Image (tube, rainbow, N blue to C red):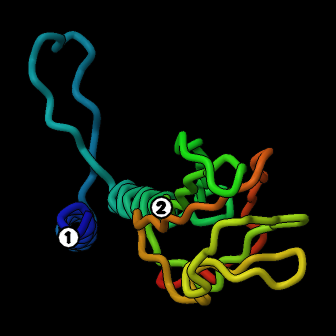
Amino acid sequence: MVSIIILVTFRIKKVAEHALSCLQSRQGEVVTSPPKHETGIKKKRLQSPMAGLIEAFVATLVLCLLTRGLCDCSLDKINIGTVRSGREISGQAEWNVTVVNNCQCPQSQIQLSCTGFQTVEKIDPSILSKQGDTCLLINGSSLEASASVYFSYAWDPPFLLLPLASVIHGC
């Protein structure tokens, strides 16, 4: 990603320098198009200073859109998967939960909806703490980009845990 930014920045600089040099060297010069009968001859493309500036603007716009796309974070980027472990605890099915931050930036204060959530299996409160109808993940600490948190609970049927809120850092 850094190499792309350096490359595009270098290209923008070169285009701007080229546009400036063209502007300075072409003052008073009359540019005419070659006769139409000269087909098949490789022609040098004449570029106006404005075309160079437009190219620099487009390159900057593409760079901005590219970096924005990489850092586009929302609650949709927090994925929660629940899978039955195959074990039973106190007569209840055990479920393994994985919470993944698919955002390119860390997220903290991740809250999940957990209305009616119950378990007969103790969950480490530093991983998931229930506060009314919401649950706080990892004590509100930051979940890094592409990182996961795992916990298990025992209840039947399984609960639908959905992300409610988070704080995005670094985008």
Where residue 45 sits: x, y (%)? 21, 38
In the image, 95 versus 42, the foreground residue is 95
Q: Secondary structure at mark 1?
A: helix
The dot on residue 6 is: 1
Q: Picture quarter containing residue 17?
A: bottom left
Q: How many marks?
A: 2
- Residue 13, placed above or below residue 38: below
- Residue 105, placed above or below residue 119: below
In the image, 124 versus 168, the foreground residue is 124
In the image, 68 versus 38, the foreground residue is 68
| Callout 2–callout 1 Cβ contact below 8 Å | no
- Residue 114, placed above or below residue 38: below
- Along the horizontal axis of the image, is 87 left or right of 159? left
- Along the horizontal axis of the image, is 165 left or right of 145? right
- Along the horizontal axis of the image, is 72 left or right of 130? left
Residue depicted at 50% across the width and 60% down the height: 100
Residue lying at the far front in this picture: please name it.
Answer: 90
| Quadrant in which the N terminus is drawn | bottom left
Q: Picture quarter containing residue 120?
A: bottom right
Please say whether residue 27 is visible from this viewpoint.
Answer: no
Callout 2 amino acid: Leu
- Disc 2 target residue: 61
